[in-house]
Amino acid sequence: MRLDGPPIFFVRGKGAWLFDADGNDYVDYLLGQGPAFLGHAPQPVVEAVEEACRRGMVYGAQHPLEAEAAELLCEVVGWPEMVRFGMTGTEMVQAALRLARAVTGRRRFVRFEGHYHGWLDNVLLAPEPGAAPGSAGQLPEALADAIVLPWNDLGAVASVLDEQGEDICAVLMEPMMLNAGAILPRPGYLDGVRDLCRRCGCLLVFDEVITGFRLAPGGAAERFGTTPDLAVYGKAMAGGWPVAALAGPALLMERFGTREVNHSGTFNGNVMAAAATVATLRILRDDPPYPRVEETGAKLMAGLGELAAERSLPLRIQGLPAAFHVSFGEGEEVIDLRSLRTRDTERYRRLALRLIGAGIWVATRGIWYVSAAHGQHELEATLERAAGALAQA
Ligand code: PMP
C-alpha cells in the first residue's frame, strides 16, 4: 500500500489499465480526467496520429482532415451545423461566451455552483457554494459578469432572467453536474431553462466537455433530449488527443467565419488533432461502445454497492454508468453542491487512497469514469481489489 508514499509515476497506459514506474498495475477509472473513453492508446487513434504527423504537424491553413473532423462531429452529435476547433475546453468556453456577447450585445451570463468551465479569471470559482474566486492571482473583478446560481432550480433561473434578462447573453452549464458529484438534471429542468433562454433572448450553452461523446454520441443533449444553442466539447472527442470544439448552428457560428468574432490559435485544427478526432468519431459512429459501457458501468455500480452493503457502509453511488460518483454519508440524494458538501469527503478520500493502493486508479473527489475498454475482466479485478479496500473503510 502506498497511501502516504511518494507520488505515483505512470509509465504506460493500455486499454483500461495504467502501469506505474514500480511495476504496479491499476484498473483506471479516472481515464486522464475523462479523455480516454476508448481506453488508453486506442490503436486506430494512435495509427491515425502517427500517420498524420508524418505529413507535417501544423499548416496554419485549412486541410481536408479538418473539414472531415468538423463534418463528422456535426453528424455524430446530430444538431450542430458548424464547428470551431481549439485545444482545450477552457478556451472553447471563452469562445462560446464571446460569441454569445457578440450575438446578443449583452455582457453578463448565468452559471452554476459546482460547475467547472476552465481555469481562466472570468470562470474559475472556489469549491464552496457562492461566487468567490478560486485562485491566488486571479482578478476577482473578472467574475463580476457571472451570476452564480444553484443548479437544478428552475425558479432561480426564471427570476434572474426575469429581472436582469436584458443584460444576460447566455446561460452556461454542465448539462449533468459532473465536476461536483454526478448529478442528473431534474425532469424538465433542461427544457425549462431552454424555454426561459428563448424567452429572454439569451443563448443556452452546454459545456459538454465531460458529457460529450460519453453519455451518448450526442452527449447530454441527446441523452436528456434538450438541444442547446451552443455546445463545447473536449476530452472524449479525440480518444485522448488534446483537442476541443465549439459547435452550433450556422446562423451563430458563421460570425467566426466572417471574422466579425475573433477566435485564434496557432494549433487550432492541427493535423494530429484532426486525425485523432476523425479516427475517434468514426469508431463512435460505426461501432458505438455505449451499450457496452452502460452494461459494465451498471454492473460496477451494483457490485460496489453490494460490497458496501455487506459491510454496512453508508456508501452512496449515484449518476450514470459512464460517469458516477461515490460518497460517504447517510440520508438524502446529492442534488446540488450544497448537499454534496454534507457528505463525508474525508472518509471517501481515505477510501480512494486505499483503492489506489489496491490497484484501482480513482479520483479522491469521488468521480468514476468507465471506458469502452472496461469489460468483464476489469470488472472482476476491480471488485476483488475493492473488497479489501472497503473492508478497512
Ligand atoms: N468544462 C468542463 C465541464 C470540464 O470538466 C473541464 C475540464 N475538466 C473544462 C471545461 C476545461 O477543459 P480543459 O481542461 O480541456 O481546459
Image (spheres, rainbow, N blue to C red):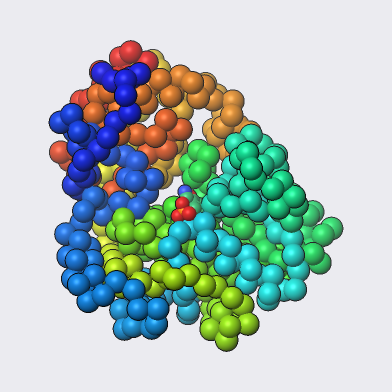
Residue closest to the far top: 392
Q: Is residue 377 left or right of residue 224?
A: left
Task: Looking at the picture, tell me which residue is in the foreground, 23 or 33.
Answer: 23
178 relative to 102, above or below:
above
User: Which quadrant of the figure contains the N terminus?
Assistant: top left
- Report the residue at 52% width, 21% height from top: 344
* The quarter of the displayed image where residue 273 is located: bottom left
User: Which quadrant of the figure contains the C terminus?
Assistant: top left
Task: Looking at the picture, tell me which residue is in the foreground, 297 or 49.
Answer: 49
Whether residue 77 is visible: no
Residue closest to the far bottom: 258
Count of residue discs = 0
299 relative to 196, above or below:
above
Counting from the top left corner in percent of width and height, residue 161 is at 77, 59
- Report the residue at 19% width, 66% height from top: 50
212 relative to 18, above or below:
below
Whether residue 331 is visible: yes
Counting from the top left corner in percent of width and height, residue 5 is at 32, 20
- Report the residue at 20% width, 72% height from top: 54
Task: Looking at the picture, tell me which residue is in the foreground, 207 or 156.
Answer: 207
Counting from the top left corner in percent of width and height, residue 124 is at 61, 47
Counting from the top left corner in percent of width and height, residue 167 is at 79, 64
Task: Looking at the picture, tell me which residue is in the foreground, 88 or 213.
Answer: 88
- Report the residue at 58% width, 70% height from top: 229
Q: Is residue 341 left or right of residue 75?
A: right
Residue closest to the far right: 163
